[in-house]
Amino acid sequence: MERSGSVDRAAERGTRWAYRLAWVLWAVTFPLIWMGGFVTTYNAGMAVPDWPNTYGYNLFLYPVESWLKTWDIFLEHSHRLIASAAGFVSIALMVILWRTGSTLLRRLGVVVFILVCVQGIIGGLRVLGQELLLANLHGCVAPLFFGLVTGVVVVTGHAIAGPDQSKGLGEWSLFRGGAAWRFLLVMIIYTQIVIGAQLRHLPPTLSPQWAFFWTIVHLIFAGLIGVALGIVWWREWREHLSKLLWLKILGAIYAVQLTLGLFTWVVNYNFPIWFLNYFLAISYTVVQGGAAQALVTTAHTATGSLLLAAGVACWLTAGLDGSPQNVRVPSPG
Amino acid sequence: MRSARDVVSLFNMIFSGSEASLTRASPGRASAGRKSVACAVLLVLSLSLAGCSKPRPVEFRLNTEGRDPASISPAQREAIVSMLTDLFGTPDEPRVPPGVHLDVELLRRAAGPTGRDFSGVERGLYRKHCAVCHGISGDGAGPIAAMLNPYPRDFRYGIFKYTSTVLGAKPTRQDLERTIRRGIPGTGMPSFAPLPDEDIQALIEYVKYLSIRGETELYLLRLVVDENELLPLNKESVIDEAVLPVAEAWEMPEKDPEHWVVKPQRPHLDEAQLKAAIERGRLIYQEPRSQCVKCHGPEGRGDGEQTDLYDDWNKPKKGVTDEQTRELSRWFSLPLQQLKPRNFQEGIFHGGGRPEDIYLRIYVGIKGTPMPAMGPAPGQPGILTPEEIWDLTFYVLSLARKTDPKK
């Protein structure tokens, strides 16, 4: 009995450490996404021609003066360094999750490890093969990884709070009731990110009709996210007020993201002619590589990932805590 | 010890698909786990194959604007493409035809895929900065082009809107540099001011290269497709009859600027003189000879009676009826786009908002558009004198409330 108690305590300690480390990984991944966004915005993905080395140097031994000398090399090399940090933290997280003994947490740890490896290899092959399609894929996997890390934070946090951490995913109500709607919302957000990645990585030989198509689809999905968010809110606000925190956060990020999306167009391609003709004439000139263009465009990319992460948290909190329909606010009287 | 065992069992699971480490997992789930791992390995392998292959070469697109591509036989297409490749190379490996003065080193910086080589020199500047709008071939039909108004410039016709050169002359190097550095306000053309000078020079050189190549291509299309010239083509005669005349036209404004280039000399006016100049400009604006009112309207709001306006790149798409327009537009990359005359009161001037810029727009016009050249040119007296053009300039700027004589 005594031995069993000490094993439980060790597992609990492990889960606590896993929770902390998952937060560390989250805190490393978000800047990594920003840096990756800057690399794409500045078209600096091929600033370093080799991989995993940097101009023949071991990644960690590349001279600091060369690293800081040229802007695009600085971005690409920094991206690689932060990515390495994310890789190391992922390995540590996997080991700690493994030691918790929970099947679910172990699996999550392995998936985090596999995904970080796959993402690193895709990034490297993009450089070696000078392949834009792989850059596109790299841009699609990054938010997926960020969403996964957010999921690990939520699940480990939930495990610390007490409930039965040995439960399998199927035993939680992740795909039933309100959680199912939230899951649908997450899926729509991710689809929108994939569509956005197509616009971020337009091949120069693509026909104008395709780019137009992707833009329209991107706009439609921006609206769909709003509709899905509205449906989830409408379903839950009467009976489940205390569980709306994540929806509020999601709504706020969505509003920021819509604004950033509009300004991303403006800082890259100027105000549309109909806007200048019929609404407000602004003599604005786009500045290629200017601070406004770099910050707004990259913020739009990073906020997309943040929206996905908030969506994952919103979904998992609903699913792990039980179906929202089961937790009703008692009516007065 | 336990950690070591954990790591070993973990790697067992990943690489051999063993379910030993999947505690409390059912056989069915273990099988699913094996499948997932196998899928991940397959994904990595397939990506490796994709990544290890050489990048796909990019090709110039044959200029079939305005004609049914099927009307060009495979033999004609082959003859044109191989002649152009022989003379100008490819987007990855540009070549300069004999007798053409283009800097090969600058071209190589601008051409090819984006990135740096092992010596740290940046290549592919055109693809990095320009191709998404102007297209690989400089056809103004890059991926984003359909959503821009006005469309990005099609370099292949050798016509550039904002120049300091008289009617019919190519732009100077400084004209292209000004547009690249400043951008075009109110349009998708950005300012590349943050770029280092050598990058801008490389881009200018590449734009000239695409333009000379484009005009040679037009010559070949006329010769081979329209006039049904017997194949094979003679390279020397193509160089003499097409390449060199175009290249010389590019050199003329640089060699003889007195003759071809207009240099605005802004008069120094005090407040009273400026007021008088604006009043004279107002009268010139209203006069029928200047034709300003026809398009820009009596108050310069861009609401003149002439509304059916198109630039040279869009005119061929315009038919008499809508049906005809649809039929003609079928053979172009981008749909018909109408021009809207500038509303001076908005204060957005595409060619630049300084008095010198407005003066040049009136003097030499906006090439390829219905905006005519009002100033004298070699062999032509011009509609307005330089003094009258300055008066008109100050009047236009007064409409935009930008008439501080010190600026």
Image (cartoon, coloured by chain):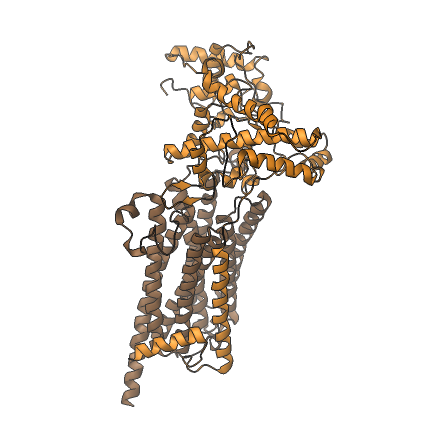
Chain colours: A brown, B orange
Whole-percent x and y of residue B223?
A: 67, 29
Q: Residue at x 51, y 80 (%)?
A: B28
Is residue A303 among what the camera can see? Answer: yes
Q: Is residue B319 visible?
A: no
**Count of all numbered marks drawn on residues in the image:** 0
Quarter the N terminus of chain B occupies: bottom left
Residue beneath the point at 43% across and 23% down:
B401
Q: Answer left or right for A105 relative to B63.
A: left
Relative to the observer, which residue lies in front, B257 or B104? B104
Q: Is residue B281 left or right of residue B230?
A: left
Kindly identify the residue that appears in the image at 44 percent across and 68 percent down. A316
Residue A80: x %, y % from top left: 35, 55
Residue sitting nearer the eye, A9 or B174: B174
The quadrant of the picture occupied by the C terminus of chain B is top left
A242 relative to B12, above or below: above
**Residue A37, above or below B333:** below
**Residue B342's spot in the image, x, y percent?**
53, 26
In this rendered view, identify the residue nearer to me: B100 or B61. B100
**Residue A209 drawn at (x, y percent):** 60, 45
For residue A310, which quarter of the picture? bottom left
Left or right of A317? Residue B79 is right
Relative height, residue B206 to residue B396 (above, below): below
